[in-house]
Image (cartoon, helix red, strand yellow):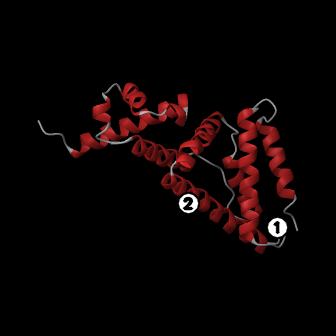
Amino acid sequence: MARTKGDHDARRREASEAVWRVLDAHGFGGLTLRAVAAELGATTGLLTHYFPTKRDLVAHALDLLEQRTADRPREVAADGSDALRGTLLAVLPLTTEAATSNRIWVSSWDPALADPGLSRDHARRYGRSRDKLRDLVAAAQERGEIRAGDPADIAAGAESFVLGLVVQALFDPAAFPARRQVALLDDYLRTLSP
């Protein structure tokens, strides 16, 4: 009996879920075709129909991580400095789900740095994030809520601050509980006031 496109799509979704479970348990360091196949209860041969190489698997995992991060529910204000604050708060590991996502993001840096194509893809991802922040900064500047300056530079500084805070919170969650992360972000944002 011939397989239908629906079967193929369903199996690919199952493979994606298995990829996520491996990432959740082991990060990118433990992401192998064998580990995903075992998690899926399939052979590596079956898995290579979806991901012919380890690089294809890693690229898919990066796309999956980006999509899951984007789909995570967030409460973000409509405009101004509140929108900037909400967007930056959404990056921080303030919940278990956000901590898991951030832990996986950080583990993705190694394979992305080792492969020029994946590195370019990651640079584009972070570039899109900075572009979004730049637009939020510019809107807050128009409202007089953020000091004058190049919105792109202010956005790059904000992204750098938040990513640094993410790393500290992941490595030392006891020293950086959610309330402290929020307080540190608010202190940082005050430095952007006019």
* In this rendering, position of residue 25 left or right of residue 36: right
Q: Where, by quadrant of the figure, is residue 54 drawn?
A: top left
Q: Residue drawn 53% across and 37% down?
A: 28
Please state which amino acid type lies under the numbered disc 2. Arg
Secondary structure, mark 1, is loop
In this view, 111 is above or below 31: below
Secondary structure, mark 2, is helix
Q: Where, by quadrant of the figure, is residue 41 drawn?
A: top left
Residue of label 2: 124
Q: Residue drawn 80% across and 49% down?
A: 185
Residue of label 1: 145
Q: Residue drawn 26% across and 42% down?
A: 8
3D distance between C-alphas at marks 1 and 2? 28 Å
User: Number of marks in the image?
Assistant: 2
Please state which amino acid type lies under the numbered disc 1. Glu
Where does residue 68 sit, x and y in percent of width and height? Answer: 52, 45
Reading the chain from its start, which is encountered first: label 1 or label 2? 2
In this view, 9 is above or below 159: above
Label number found at residue 107: none
In this view, 41 is above or below 84: above
User: Which quadrant is home to the C terminus?
Assistant: bottom right
Foreground of the two, 135 or 83: 135
Foreground of the two, 113 or 65: 113
